[in-house]
Image (cartoon, helix red, strand yellow):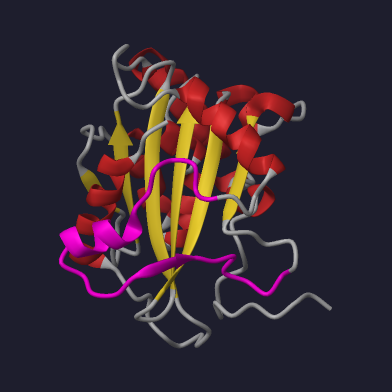
Amino acid sequence: MPAPNPRGAHPGPPRYGDRVKIPGAVTGILALAVATTALAACGSSDSKVSVDKLQQAADKAHAAPTAPCPVGFDVDAALKKAGLSGTATPDPGSNDPDAHPVDAVSATDAKDGSPFQSFGGAMITCTYKLSTGGYLEATVTGVRHGKAVALMAPMLSRDGEIASHDLEKVVTQKYDAGKAVLMPGDGLAAVVARKASGGDVALEVTTETGGDPDAKKPIIGEQLRKLSEELGKQIKV
């Protein structure tokens, strides 16, 4: 039997197969996003965020997933600046022995037909246990082709509990660099775009409960937006 999951209703730690498996309902949306935004994916050449360096960091994190989060997060500082109490500690977020505080995947070993073969780049998720209860997940995604938010669409749909008719807007809307945007509905997830060299980079932030399936996510709405914006400023790869 699988190990129990202390995050209750959440399906487990952010694994590649779970977070970016492409459901049939969004396949057409992703294809549209790749086709219509490829030319807009170029970023500033002097940006502090590099898709190449993100992929290199993902490859190292995949080999050593218990190492510190490699993208520069100081969650305690971000919580304070966002006006939130408590502290954060790196944590696998699950009793699964294969779960780690850092989860990474990249195009380096992408399989034929996989999303990363089409988009290129990498994805790094860092998970933290909040002293005030629950967990925080911050996922940085960088792609060489199209938009990072398109690759993140399946996990945004899940984490933000986004209705299918809102998902196309989420994927195709414009995101101003550095400005956090709450996902439709109850604001259960937020996205921050970053200027990037070599492609397009975006951050998704969401929180999960600490085991009670009936509990609400600990940080949502405007508080999550402010926290996400602070975390977005910290990304350095």
Furthest toward the right, the residue is 1
Q: Which residues are magenta?
A: 68-96
Furthest toward the front, the residue is 67
Quarter the C terminus occupies: top left
Q: How many marks?
A: 0
The residue lying at 42 percent from left, 38 percent from top is 149
Q: Nearer the viewer, residue 78 or 42?
A: 78
The quadrant where residue 101 appears? bottom right
The residue lying at 68 percent from left, 49 percent from top is 17
Most common SS among magenta residues: loop
Q: Position of residue 40 (x, y in %)?
A: 33, 17
Compared to residue 148, the image places residue 18 above or below, namely below
Q: Position of residue 170 (x, y in %)?
A: 34, 43
Does residue 134 belong to the magenta stretch?
Answer: no
Task: Tell me: 32 left or right of 217.
Answer: right
Quarter the N terminus occupies: bottom right
Residue 17 in sight? yes
Q: Position of residue 173 (x, y in %)?
A: 28, 35
Residue 32 in sight? no
Task: Tell me: 132 left or right of 121.
Answer: left
The residue lying at 45 percent from left, 78 percent from top is 209
Does residue 83 belong to the magenta stretch?
Answer: yes
Q: Position of residue 22 (x, y in %)?
A: 62, 43
The quadrant where residue 115 appears? top right
Q: Nearer the viewer, residue 103 or 77?
A: 77
The quadrant where residue 136 appears? bottom left
Task: Tell me: 16 left or right of 34.
Answer: right
